[in-house]
Amino acid sequence: MSVIARNITKTFGAYTALADVSLEVPTGKLVALLGPSGSGKTTLLRIIAGLEFADPGSGRIDFHGQDVTDTPAGRRGVGFVFQHYALFRHMTVAQNIAFGLTVRPRKERPPQAKIDARVKELLKLIQLEDLGGRYPSQLSGGQRQRVALARALAVDPKVLLLDEPFGALDARVRKDLRRWLRHFQREIGVTTIFVTHDQEEALELADEVVVMNNAKIEQVGTPQEVYDQPASPFVIEFLGNVNRFAALGHPLPGAGGDALYVRPHDVDIQRDYKGEHGIRVRIEHVFSAGNYGRLALVRTDNHETIDAEISRARLAELGLRAGEEAWVVFRHIRLFPAEGKFTERDVVADDAAPAVADPGRGI
Ligand code: ADP
Ligand code: MG
């Protein structure tokens, strides 16, 4: 079931929550709506669900080529999970999962044996096979969200809509659930739209990421595309740590007003440097844990700070300590001209050491 939203505008009084937004979700894909709080993600999801409607005269929603713009939520065949999706406290896990089926009118309700079989199947899918008899209060937060997912899936929705479903859980549980959801979604192949403000979550989970900002879509692309070829300064700043400079002060381009961006892992550090692309820095702080060394640097010419991330091996080889001076050379610079449309341009300093291939590095 593909989902297409076209030219959706939504205003609340004088406030525009969505400004002519269009979105396409291919059948069976998991698409993440990623953006800061207030960017319009939930509003767009609710309009797709049929819980909210676009401004009169604006926009259209198609489910698999069928116009559902005026179809109410209950008849769209969507399943939802929200951040605080309260399970019914007085019902067991199994009863919660069965809920959507048991409340159907008698004529449409499957026989009890069918409902039981479906619940059993879903309990297996969410890996809580033995916990059907428990009450929500006897589950962990992560287990509860899995039950919420099973409950949403019980009625065989054509589209699954998840609004920050892991937002209330701690980091460790979020990571586990993320991995679990990815496998699970691929396995059942239900078209899924996942809202999050967490870039790591979006990049790790989604087939496609829709970056939202200020009631608009800034960019749509695979995780790699939005990370490696950001369409705007907003996207590059939102997707992970990045150094921003007004100018470099050496022969690489960058006139006044241009925005120059360098990811911390594209900062090479050298003790002695004779080329023309170096910037002199003082090392403020060295932090190393895990595979990486992170350095907080300060330019000696203008006191701008630079964050660098290098391998532990490179850090050991350089033997740098706080208070010392060194050179940095950028491996890869992304430039957004100050005027006109943002066209990104890559600049590579070829006298920088190549990036070390670090297997399994994070984002
Ligand atoms: P997000 O999910 O990205 O955080 P939302 O879609 O919830 O953003 O909200 C976008 C903007 O629209 C916010 O500024 C919010 O305050 C406003 N908004 C959302 N729903 C309503 C509403 N029912 N009435 C008034 N303003 C709303
Ligand atoms: Mg929201």
Image (cartoon, rainbow, N blue to C red):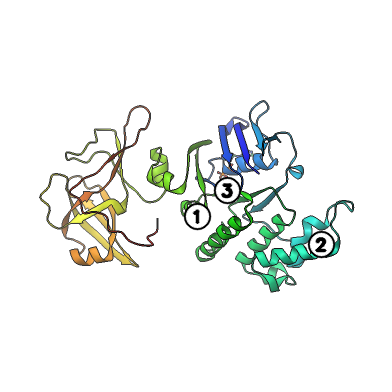
Q: Point out the image quarter for the C terminus.
A: bottom left
Q: Point out the image quarter for the N terminus.
A: top right
Which residue in the protein does label 1 denote?
201
Residue type at the position of mark 3: Lys
First in residue order: circle 2 vs circle 3: 3
Tell me whether the residue at label 1 lies in contact with that at label 2, contact meaning CB atoms closer than 8 angstroms. Answer: no
- Residue at (68%, 27%) from the top-left corner? 56
First in residue order: circle 1 vs circle 3: 3
- Position in image of residue 128 (x %, y %): 66, 69
Q: Quadrant of residue 354?
A: bottom left
Q: Would you place residue 150 above or below residue 25 in this image?
A: below
Which residue in the protein does label 2 denote?
114
Q: Nearer the viewer, mark 1 or mark 3?
A: 3
Residue 319 visible, this orientation: no
Farthest residue, direction right: 106
- Residue at (70%, 56%) from the top-left corner? 153
Farthest residue, direction bottom: 130
Gap between marks 1 and 2, in whole Å? 36 Å
Tell me whether the residue at label 2 lies in contact with that at label 3, contact meaning CB atoms closer than 8 angstroms. Answer: no
Residue type at the position of mark 1: Glu
**Mark 2 surroundings: few (<14), some (14-19) or many (≥20) residues within 10 A:** few
Foreground residue among 363 and 190: 190
Label 2 element class: helix
Which residue in the protein does label 3 denote?
29
Gap between marks 1 and 3, in whole Å? 16 Å
Label 1 element class: helix
Label 3 element class: loop
Farthest residue, direction left: 274
Q: Nearer the viewer, mark 1 or mark 2?
A: 2
